[in-house]
Amino acid sequence: MKPAPFDYCRPATVAEALEALGSSESSRVLAGGQSLIPAMNFRLTDVSVLVDINRVDGLASVDCDLGGVTVGAAATQTRVLEHEGAAGVVGGLRAALRHVGHLQIRNRGTVCGSLAHADPAAELPALAVASGAVIAVSGPDGERRIDAADFFIGPFWTALEDGELITEVHFPAQPPGSVTIVDEISRRAGDFAVAGLVATVQADGGAVRSARLVGFGLGGVPTRLETAEAAIEGWAADHPADTLAEAVMADTADAFDDIHATSWYRREAVAALTVRAARQALADAEAA
Amino acid sequence: MTISEPISEVDVEVTVNGQPQRHRVPARLLLSDYIRDTVGLTGTHLGCEHGYCGACTVIVDGDAVRSCLMLAAQVDGAEVRTVEDLAPAGADSLSPMQQAFHDNHALQCGFCTAGFLMTLESVDPTEWNEPERVVELLSGNLCRCTGYQNIVTAVTEAWSAYDGSGGSDDG
Ligand SMILES: Cc1cc2nc3c(=O)[nH]c(=O)nc-3n(C[C@H](O)[C@H](O)[C@H](O)COP(=O)(O)OP(=O)(O)OC[C@H]3O[C@@H](n4cnc5c(N)ncnc54)[C@H](O)[C@@H]3O)c2cc1C
Ligand code: FES
Ligand code: FES
């Protein structure tokens, strides 16, 4: 189907974009359009004013330094995936983006758009929570910064208020000696995950020191696996996998059922992914 | 060009397959419908209009994109290429990839073919010519007829001169 009529603008500055967003109650930001335009084509989303931010000055940048990487709201996923930044800085984004859609989707889709969209099965919100990302927002009342942990409220629902715009997101560099692994179960390469895991793991001397574990596709928002984070400390490859898997099961009791999988299947899947991630982190640490 | 005030009709100047085009279009017109109905190039097909099938894939400023997930308004100032641009105009010959599709029965109904060809045209074979990478590349295009095997065979044949490890034999 085709979208219903709307008015379109393509502002040059953040101030102009905010003004246009404030001009109507059903105004929307258009970034990559890879989630919004399908919803408009289906007439699931009602838009009166569409504010295309792709030509706003300065929003397409990807800046890396030792502290981390800052991705502007108009920077495409392909741009970030191809960025030459060091593995310790953009490694997590690279690992996540490999699972996002297909080449043609990533060529338009943005990192910030995925956060704003907040699909419960999306990789980037989970990565943002796992890595302690900070989302920079501009709105009618000025600018504010929101920790990823406070940003996701429910499925397709974030802390963004009406008339607010994400201008950029900052992903801090990973702790030294750690690796970020993004793994998932999906029906077909490039499809949204049935369930998945982002694991930032620090390992040395044959054992896991600490890890940040965040599941996705389990509930309405990225799911921090805190029992498993405690259980994984000191875990070594010859330890029983069950201790880790049981901890994940305890963390995921609320996982949902749908046509693609039962709650139980999702929990088992993330438990298996957690064991796999721990083993891989240990192998990577040994090879390093 | 930027547009600061919201408007319902947008002026678009774009190059399509090397030809300059100029139209005033409704803001809601999809790029796919612009290409088919306004410019009149019907080689680009529409299967789903929500980003899943890849039949509508075209190249915008060098990148393969879903034309059903862009607005015509967004290509103002851009260069768009469609399947009609692959074989040299007026020549009876096909492009090497088209010929390989033909030779290997890589299409049956042909509905998906333009999308596959434009995805393939958009990439540098020296970066993608490895069996796993070819399959990954093609995962964004659906084909309901062939079972994909003949498409992979065609790509392998058309790209046989390239090694996929980042360097090329003959460019
Ligand atoms: C076939 C297909 C497969 C896909 N597979 C995956 C997948 O496996 N994993 C995955 O995570 N995603 C997937 N996606 C979605 C894709 O990653 C989208 O690009 C992403 O979810 C949204 O980013 P966007 O830039 O396209 O945003 P848009 O579609 O432009 O916008 C999405 C929403 O966010 C809002 N928004 C966007 N940018 C901002 C901003 N800067 N400030 C405030 N609000 C904003 C919009 O108003 C809209 O409500 C897929 C999409 C398709 C079509
Ligand atoms: S018609 Fe565009 S992806 Fe199916
Ligand atoms: S040849 Fe019929 S869909 Fe591909």
Image (cartoon, rainbow, N blue to C red):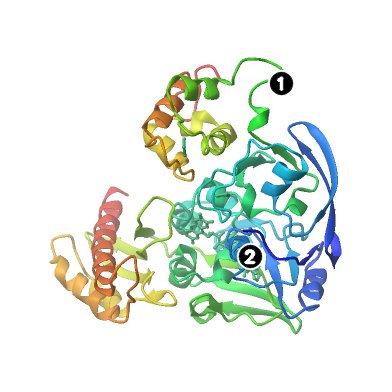
Q: Which is nearer the eye, B49 or A252?
A: B49
Q: What residue would you read off at disc 1?
A: B89
Image coords of residue B68 (percent x, y): 63, 51
Image coords of residue A232 (percent x, y): 25, 71
- Splitting the image into 4 quarters, where does residue B26 fall? bottom right
Q: What residue would you read off at disc 2?
A: A40
**Disc 2 element:** helix
Left or right: B52 as drawn, with respect to B5: left
Left or right: A69 as drawn, with respect to B70: left
Q: Compared to A34, does A259 lie above or below?
A: below
**Disc 1 element:** loop
Q: Which residue occupies 20% across, 67% down?
A: A235
Q: Compared to A238, does B144 lie above or below?
A: above
Image coords of residue B17 (percent x, y): 73, 32
Type of amino acid at the residue the image marks with label 2: Met
Q: Chain of mark 1?
A: B
